[in-house]
Amino acid sequence: MKIGILGTGIVGTTIARALLAQGHEILIGSRSGANERAEQVVNEYPGTALQGNFTNAALFGPVIFHCVMGIYSIDAARMAGEENFHNKIVIDLTNPLDFSQGMPPRLTVCNDNSSGEMLQQFLKSAKIVKAFNTVPYVVITNPALVNNKNIDMFICGNDTNAKEEVTELIVREFSWNRENVIDLGEIKHARSTEGLLPFVASYAMRFGSFNNVIKMYRG
């Protein structure tokens, strides 16, 4: 499958390497189209890994990972071109975090809106699925690192079929347990998952590690 990735940070490149290892073709997009971190991935997987700008990534395949910093989410989508996301599945990993006053971060949007909802409002013809945003990057592609994979991944979005496809991708390509991929419902529930991040940061500050995950137990 051809998959585009917007963002060349540690999250985007980790996902790119995992998908390339599974035989997918990947185009990693940055603002400039020439990025050192993306180039490293391209050199590791010649022929199946490409790099370009945000527009190239949005055009590349039917599934797009949106891995930019939350404060630049809409800007990156705008640079890529709204029309280039038409009818595509966009997996949104962004969190609206503001670190300007230190830790724990503040949310730049909360309660009555979310980064996921804002992206869906901007990319009206895309199928936004919020996923991965509560999970450390090292666990996204290797859930066995924690609690023998008995950890929860929360997703949400307005398109049921898109969520089913994303669930299949999470299970098939990243080896998550299907029962641990929990569909919370419509994209408005991104408010809840994004709202977990300040707590996750506080917990990390207390115990000195960001490799923490969430497991919900139903009574």
Image (spheres, rainbow, N blue to C red):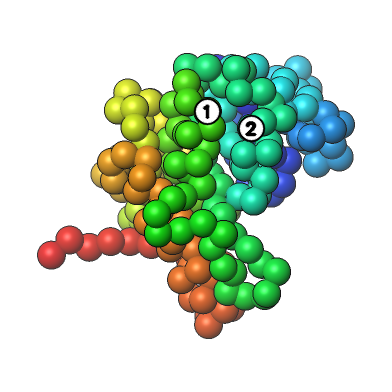
Residue matched to label 2: 77
**Position of 119 compared to 31: left or right?**
left
Which amino acid, by three-letter code, is at mark 1? Answer: Leu
**Position of 17 compared to 125: left or right?**
right
What residue is at 17 percent from the left and 61 percent from the top?
218
Q: Which numbered disc flags the more N-terminal residue, 1 or 2?
A: 2
User: Does residue 147 lie above or below 141 as drawn?
Assistant: below
Give the quarter of the figure containing the C terminus: bottom left
Secondary structure found at label 1: loop
Residue 22 in sight from this viewpoint: no
Measured Cα–Cα span from mark 1 to mark 2: 8 Å
Quarter location, residue 56: top right
Q: Are marks 1 and 2 in contact (CB under 8 Å)?
A: yes
Which residue is at the far bottom?
206
Question: Residue 216 appears at what percent x and percent y?
Answer: 28, 61
What residue is at 76 percent from the left and 34 percent from the top?
30
What residue is at 53 percent from the left and 23 percent from the top?
63
Nearer to me, 170 or 188: 188
Quarter location, residue 163: top left
Question: Residue 57 appears at what percent x and percent y?
Answer: 68, 24
Q: Any mark on residue 123, and which?
A: 1
Residue 9 in sight from this viewpoint: yes
Which amino acid, by three-letter code, is at mark 2? Answer: Ala
**Position of 176 compared to 184: left or right?**
right
Nearer to me, 182 or 118: 118
Secondary structure found at label 2: helix
**Position of 118 compared to 73: left or right?**
left
Question: Residue 15 appears at what percent x and percent y?
Answer: 60, 39
